[in-house]
Amino acid sequence: MKTRGLIQIYTGAGKGKTTAAFGAALRMLGHGQRVGIVQFFKDPDKDGALHALRRFGRKVRVWSFGGGFTWEATREANAKSVAEAWEQCKTLLRDPKYPLVIFDEVHIALKYKFLKTSEVVKALKRKPQGKHVILTGRGAPAMLIKTADLVTEMKCVRHPLCGGCQTQRGVEF
């Protein structure tokens, strides 16, 4: 049986997409490998998981673009940050020192048409054979799902926000 770099998607309306991706990052780090993470729309200062991953020093590199999700910035600001994020993604796809790269919330960029799905699929098909790529976010497009080796859809059954409980540091971020 052969091995090769996998394209993995974590999508759906449920919680845990980024957490699943970061779990894969921890496994890679546990084997002494490096991980590159590009975050679309997220504010890196608010993410406790990123603070933990950064403790691995040069083994983890994170590039965050944008200071919040689409409703917290203008369309022009989001378009600019997505373009910058995508350029970094393409660079990481070619960079041999990162066997695992994570494109966190890239599906949101695709959903709001800041980025073309066909362009992402084309880049993924050109990746080096041993490169693992994880893409996260709600609403993964069908064309991207068809390209992936593994697709997991998170489904929310119950969430404390629906019961009036606020998001909590260390739990949701």
Image (cartoon, helix red, strand yellow):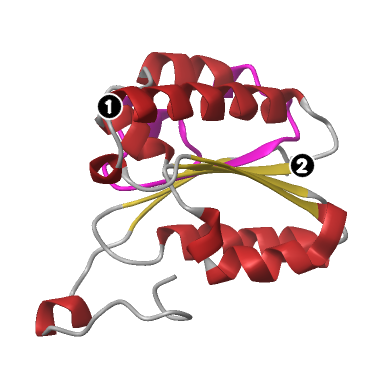
Amino acid under label 2?
Answer: Pro
Residue 154 shows up from this direction = yes
Query: In the drawing, what numbered circle is on residue 75?
Result: 1
Residue wearing tag 2? 99
Q: Considering depth in this image, is 29 or 37 the residue closer to the camera?
A: 37
Q: Estimate the x, y position of residue 118 in percent, counting from the top left.
A: 40, 15
Q: Residue at x 43, y 37 (%)?
A: 106
Q: Residue at x 55, y 71 (%)?
A: 48
Mark 2–mark 1 Cα distance, whole angstroms, equals 33 Å
Q: Estimate the x, y position of residue 134 in percent, counting from the top left.
A: 55, 44
Check whether the beta carbons of the residues at disc 2 and disc 1 lie within 8 A of each other.
Answer: no
Amino acid under label 1?
Answer: Arg
**Front of the two marks 2 and 1:** 1
Q: Residue at x 32, y 38 (%)?
A: 108
Residue 159 shows up from this direction = no
Q: Estimate the x, y position of residue 5 in percent, counting from the top left.
A: 68, 38
Q: Earlier in the sequence, mark 2 or mark 1?
A: 1
Q: Which residues are magenta?
A: 124-149
Dividing the image into 4 quarters, which one contains the N terminus?
Answer: top right
Q: Quadrant of residue 9?
A: top left
